[in-house]
Image (tube, rainbow, N blue to C red):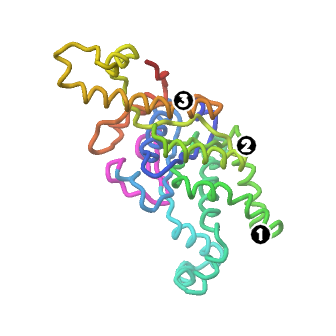
Amino acid sequence: MLDAALQRRLVFITGKGGVGRTAVALALALAAARAGKRTLVVEINPMGRLGEYLGDVTLGPEPTEITPELAAAAIAPTVIMEDFLTGMLKLRALARRLLESNTFRVVTAAAPGLEDFLTLVRVAEWEDERVGFKRRRHRFDLVIVDAPATGHSVPLLSTPGTLLKMLPFGPLTSTARDLALLLADPKRAAVAMVTRAEEMAVNETLELATALMRIGVALLPVIVNAVDPFRFTRVEAQRIRAEPPDVPADWEPYLPVARFAVARQKAADRQIRRLTQALPDKPVCLPQVPAGRISLATLEPLADALAHPSARSS
């Protein structure tokens, strides 16, 4: 999984709410940084928890160095809108006054997608930012975006194409075209979907995959988060499910718990097989992180699993 991500410069992480997108995005960024890549992880959810996972770091629109190879930033729609208006009006006080006006709220409501567009512009600037002598070196080798949940990711990634259809000419057209080319280039950008081995989450993931392929963005292997480890081999599971159960007498008090674990294991495998059969790349399964508080240290096992995925087999 890490190798596939490192072949690009921009990776969006998305998925159904509650599947652990932020933890996975940070784990992938950690794995890339450990591989020696200058990595930026970006949060575009105003209610996100990336700063908390990094040790209660306050993140802003400028990258904050976490380690020598890892930086983090957070994009707030109101901030990027204010910066955009300041660039147009040249006065921040005037831009804030316009933002607070009812007229401007009506205009932005009538033109949906402007905040998404400006968010993508900021992300693209980081993807292309260069430093050093004659600006020959990219500031970041990889930009990982902790994107919104499924319902908003498709509109976000569709924004450049939508604007080009609405505004074939004008001051934003060139930028929208550049964004559309960036997102459509499989050598530069891709999307990784995060899910859980549960029926509803997998259903939504497959629907999302269809929508993303329709947009034309490249897909990385699906990441199945928080997969329980195998507790029983196939033979042991058959013995536990048998009627009567084929287990030693001293197992019988624990039989209900064992049967529950077998049923859960079987259900998870069924959903992982659905993903394998429906999508071109085999899913990457990540272990459950038994931590009350997520941090870089507790995400090490996820980073290891992303860097060196192993097949889930019984």
Residue 313, given in percent of the width and then of the height, sits at 46, 19
Residue on which disc 1 sits: 171
Q: Is residue 143 above or below residue 117?
A: above
Q: Nearer the viewer, mark 1 or mark 2?
A: 2
Q: Which residue is mark 2?
A: 185
Give the magenta range.
Answer: 53-73
How far is the residue under mark 1 from the one under mark 2? Answer: 23 Å
Among the two numbered marks 1 and 2 on one chain, the one whose residue lies closer to the N terminus: 1
Residue 69 is inside the magenta segment:
yes
Quadrant of the frame with the C terminus: top left
Name the image quarter holding residue 273: top right
Distance from Cα at disc 1 to Cα at disc 3: 48 Å
Instruction: Please tell me which residue is depicted at 34% across the width and 52% down the height of the picture.
Output: 52
Q: Secondary structure at mark 1?
A: loop
Q: State the residue at coordinates (31%, 31%).
A: 260
Q: Residues within 10 Å of mark 1 (few under 14, many from 20)?
A: few
Residue 227 magenta:
no
Dot 2 lies on which element? Answer: loop
Question: Residue 97 in the image: x percent, y percent?
Answer: 53, 84
Residue 145, position in %: x, y?
54, 49
Q: Could you say which disc has been placed on residue 273 in the image?
A: 3
User: Which is nearer the eye, 87 or 120?
Assistant: 120
Identify residue type, mark 2: Asp
The single residue placed furthest to the front in the displayed view is: 243
Distance in Å between CA atoms under marks 2 and 3: 29 Å
Depth check: give the residue in front, 24 or 187: 24
Q: Residue at x 57, y 83 (%)?
A: 98
